[in-house]
Image: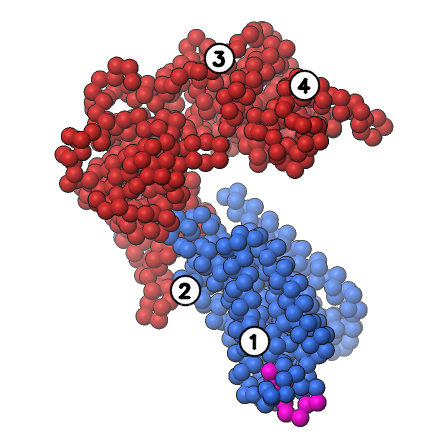
Chain colours: A red, B blue
């Protein structure tokens, strides 16, 4: 691993025996495969009593998958988990909880129509001697818990009416109320302000004194360096190493997180012109993203980097009219437009390849041709109201040839094609509309390397043919390799726009972690 | 709130709600009162009689819907989990047929089981309840473990149970029931049974873990699962209880009619769903109360008896019922959208 000083992977025999007495949780040889992706590949992890162990890695590095395995939410394909030296199997969240492993979930897992107290004590409601739920006692228990944690939320309000931050604090209090030995926190501060986050760190310090072992996932580097005792780094589903906090610098962590072989070549033959295709000024969707301002030039590939949930896809959806903006200006080719529906966006020359191919993009049971032609039907290929079948067929057939779609015929159901070929069909859908502006959201996610390179070449060619392209991607090498400029999105706003020369994995990660 | 020492975060102020506004059924109760007063006014204008001034008429209004009411209590619980139960009407018919065949009196010419006559009334009643419970269990197992969507699983049960009801006597009705058995369907007994069951489940949903789990699963099944709830097992319980209540409804229906035939309970499942929805139960899951459903059931009863009283054509009755259902669901969608915006 190049020349990083002093990495001391835990699991080496000497260290292992040293910490035997403090060991709380140990997982070894954990592997987990999801359809199309190997989420975890033979990873290990150890947690000692009264410490905070941080997990770091990019999106998709496997941290959340590992935590879900420890919390019994999903089951590993291989591997063993030891709790205080005893091998345990964690087949359900209940088994994990009864072994003393509780988790604060990343996605807010509360029941919105139920009260705060009901949410905290669900399954553990205090009962009176008739076996009925004792609401008064439940309320007192909640207040006592909240007092201890200095959380100020009314136990009787429904969680659906709380602010996101208060909901997160309820979630934290609920996890702590299990009085567990191991507490897993998956991005607990992503919804919190700095003040609330500091409050959480005080709670964590208290828990540590009580001997609780805390597993902590965060993308925020400052947090990690502030509160953690040990740091484990994951990359692409593999375990990289574990380091004591203090023996590794911020730059080294970033380097270990992002380092990977750049096996793919990124063809780069487009040259952006000076002409502006899309100009966005102060675009805001209340509660989602704020004051988004950028220009997109003809023939340019503009990368959108950021974490999942930073608001990249939300901006794309607003540009495409799925969720119209609450304020701000959009100009296409110097014409002010007010896009309120995808139909309008298509007529203005905007195309949007959605992130979730299966959910939002392809119609699995319909044929290649039907999938490809659906966006162009509104605006062309009709003669006095009837579809011009022959012309459509020819256009789709040409497009399949151009994109090298491997399908038996135009009638083949899209669901039977490989991921890469499905994506090519969807790309063809937007190319048929001859868009001026094409937004591509994770265009190569879950696609094998060969098809990836082909799609990259196509994107590059579309840009040199004069399309303006927004490329949203969580894969750093893809963003860096393809983009003329990179927009870094963080927490619903633009953290900065980097030129091709300035944009590196480190500079982007630092902008995100800032 | 003074006992909270430090206030790190601003406490969410509970909306200041005065006493009567706390009763969530107040809106739908006003609709009920409105319909009653409308019938009263129209009664004086067109018929020259009081509608509400006749307690017997009101009892009959509720008596007519008490069987639907009993199944609606189960259907409400199913809908709160985010599911649906289309099988309840057919289960009424199936249990009624089987129950009636075990409740025949001696000397009846067309006895189904000549050796099983003059059985004490508790035998057919228990068999009916168990039969409904078993059918509900099948629904629940198909949905929770075989992962068949609730709509499809209970649609299958709806068609098959109706088929069993017809097959059981090759389409013949079953009559000649013992007086001991038919007593439970006489006078206002069905209303009493309906009200007692409603009270039991109203409190069960509010004050037992069974109720809390039901709401939790409907509100966010993933959250319920990570809280350690065995979601699958609980879903089976809820559908089993809904089936059991349909079985009880079958017993009551057959005792009240003093006969059983395979067409009983036809479309009751839709009336039960309508009652739940009118009463504020959300088809999205997680929201709903038995008290609301009871009011919804009474509204359905009032519409039908009020229209009969006003001598309005039965066809109009159905048209108005349809409109009320759509308006109720429409307001539910509106309310939940407002809730989301907050």
Letter of the chain that mark 2 sits on in the rendering: B
Question: Mark 2 sits on what residue?
Answer: B208
Q: Residue at x 60, y 88 (%)?
A: B115
Letter of the chain that mark 4 sits on in the rendering: A
Q: Position of residue A289 (x, y in %)?
A: 49, 29
Crowd tier of the residue under label 4, counting other residues whose Cα lies within 10 Å: few below 14, some 14–19, many 20 or above: few
Among the 4 quarters of the image, the one containing residue A77: top left
Q: Position of residue A53 (x, y in %)?
A: 26, 34
- Mark 1 lies on a secondary structure that is helix
Among the 4 quarters of the image, the one containing residue A134: bottom left
Question: Mark 4 sits on what residue?
Answer: A401
The answer to the question of whether label 3 and label 1 lie on touching residues, with beta carbons closer than 8 A, is no
Spatial separation of the CA atoms under disc 1 and disc 4: 66 Å
Crowd tier of the residue under label 1, counting other residues whose Cα lies within 10 Å: few below 14, some 14–19, many 20 or above: many
State whether the magenta stretch is mostly helix, strand or loop. loop
- Mark 2 lies on a secondary structure that is loop
B316 is within the stretch colored magenta: no
Q: Which residues are magenta?
A: B102-109
Question: Mark 1 sits on what residue?
Answer: B128
Question: Mark 3 sits on what residue?
Answer: A265
In the rendering, which numbered label is found on residue A77?
none
Spatial separation of the CA atoms under disc 2 and disc 4: 64 Å
Letter of the chain that mark 1 sits on in the rendering: B
Q: Relative to residue B67, is residue A491 drawn left or right?
A: left
Q: Residue at x 30, y 22 (%)?
A: A253
């Amino acid at each position: 691993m190049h020349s990083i000083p002093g990495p001391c992977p835990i699991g080496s025999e000497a260290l292992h025996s040293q910490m035997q007495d403090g060991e709380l949780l140990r997982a070894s040889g954990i592997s987990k495969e999801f359809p199309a992706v190997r989420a975890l590949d033979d990873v290990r992890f150890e947690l000692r009593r009264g410490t905070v162990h941080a997990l770091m890695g990019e999106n998709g590095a496997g941290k959340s998958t590992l935590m879900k395995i420890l919390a019994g939410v999903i089951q590993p394909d291989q591997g063993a988990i030891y709790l205080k030296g005893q091998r345990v199997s964690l087949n359900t969240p209940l088994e994990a909880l009864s072994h003393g492993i509780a988790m604060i979930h990343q996605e807010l897992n509360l029941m919105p129509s139920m009260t705060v107290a009901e949410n905290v004590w669900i399954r553990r409601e205090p009962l009176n001697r008739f076996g009925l739920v004792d609401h008064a006692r439940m309320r007192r228990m909640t207040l006592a818990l909240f007092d201890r944690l200095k959380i100020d939320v009314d136990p009787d309000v429904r969680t659906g009416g709380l602010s996101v931050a208060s909901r997160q604090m309820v979630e934290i209090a609920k996890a702590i109320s299990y009085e567990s030995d191991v507490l897993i926190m998956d991005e607990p501060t992503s919804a919190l302000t700095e003040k609330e986050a500091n409050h959480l760190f005080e709670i964590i310090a208290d828990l540590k004194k009580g001997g609780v072992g805390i597993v902590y996932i965060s993308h925020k580097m400052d947090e990690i360096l502030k509160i953690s005792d040990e740091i484990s780094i994951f990359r692409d589903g593999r375990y990289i190493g574990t380091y004591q906090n203090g023996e590794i610098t911020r730059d080294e962590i970033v380097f270990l997180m992002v380092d990977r072989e750049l096996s793919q070549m990124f063809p780069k033959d487009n040259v952006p012109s000076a002409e502006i295709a899309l100009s966005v000024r102060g675009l805001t969707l209340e509660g989602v993203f704020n004051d988004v301002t950028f220009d997109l030039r003809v023939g340019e590939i503009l990368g959108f980097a950021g974490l999942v949930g930073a608001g990249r896809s939300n901006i794309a959806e607003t540009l495409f009219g799925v969720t119209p903006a609450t304020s701000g200006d959009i100009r296409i080719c110097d014409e002010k437009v007010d896009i309120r529906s995808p139909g309008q966006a298509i007529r203005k020359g905007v195309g949007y390849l959605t992130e979730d191919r299966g959910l939002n993009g392809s119609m699995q049971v319909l044929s290649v041709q039907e999938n490809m032609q659906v966006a162009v039907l509104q605006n062309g290929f009709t003669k006095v109201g009837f579809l011009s079948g022959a012309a459509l067929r020819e256009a789709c057939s040409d497009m399949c040839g151009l994109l090298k779609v491997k399908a038996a015929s135009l009638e083949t159901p899209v669901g039977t094609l490989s991921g890469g070929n499905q994506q090519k069909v969807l790309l063809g859908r937007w190319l048929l509309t001859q868009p001026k502006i094409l937004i591509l959201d994770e265009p190569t996610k879950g696609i094998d390397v060969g098809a990836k390179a082909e799609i990259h070449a196509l994107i590059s060619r579309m840009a040199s043919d004069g399309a303006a392209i927004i490329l949203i991607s969580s894969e750093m090498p893809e963003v860096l390799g393809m983009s003329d400029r990179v927009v870094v999105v963080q927490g619903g706003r633009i953290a900065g726009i980097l030129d091709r020369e300035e944009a590196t994995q480190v500079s982007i990660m630092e902008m995100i972690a800032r | 709130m003074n006992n909270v020492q430090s206030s790190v975060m601003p406490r969410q102020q509970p909306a200041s709600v005065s006493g009567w506004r706390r009763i969530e059924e107040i809106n739908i109760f006003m609709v009920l009162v409105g319909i009653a007063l409308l019938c009263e006014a129209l009664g004086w204008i067109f018929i020259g009689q009081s509608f509400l001034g006749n307690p017997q008429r009101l009892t009959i209004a509720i008596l007519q819907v008490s069987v639907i009411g009993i199944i609606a209590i189960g259907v409400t619980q199913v809908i709160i989990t985010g599911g649906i139960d289309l099988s309840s009407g057919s289960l009424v018919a199936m249990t009624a047929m089987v129950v009636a065949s075990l409740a025949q009196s001696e000397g009846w010419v067309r006895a189904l089981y000549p050796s099983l006559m003059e059985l004490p009334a508790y035998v057919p009643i228990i068999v009916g309840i168990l039969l409904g419970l078993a059918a509900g269990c099948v629904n629940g197992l198909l949905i929770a473990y075989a992962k068949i969507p609730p709509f499809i699983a209970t649609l299958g049960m709806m068609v098959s149970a109706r088929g069993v009801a017809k097959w059981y006597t090759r389409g013949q009705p079953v009559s000649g029931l013992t007086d001991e058995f038919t007593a439970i369907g006489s006078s206002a007994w069905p209303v009493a049974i309906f009200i007692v069951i409603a009270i039991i489940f109203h409190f069960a949903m509010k004050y037992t873990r069974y109720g809390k789990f039901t709401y939790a699963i409907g509100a966010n099944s993933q959250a319920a699962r990570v809280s350690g709830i065995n979601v699958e097992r609980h879903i089976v319980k809820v559908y089993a209880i809904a089936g059991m209540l349909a079985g009880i409804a079958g017993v009551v229906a057959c005792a009240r009619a003093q006969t059983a035939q395979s067409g009983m309970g036809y479309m009751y499942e839709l009336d039960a769903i309508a009652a739940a929805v009118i009463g504020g139960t959300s088809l999205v899951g997680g929201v709903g109360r038995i008290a609301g459903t009871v009011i919804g059931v009474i509204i359905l009863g009032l519409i039908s008896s009020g229209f009969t009283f006003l001598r309005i054509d039965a066809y109009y009755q159905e048209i108005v019922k349809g409109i009320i259902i759509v308006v109720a669901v429409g307001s539910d969608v509106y309310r939940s959208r407002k809730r989301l915006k907050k």
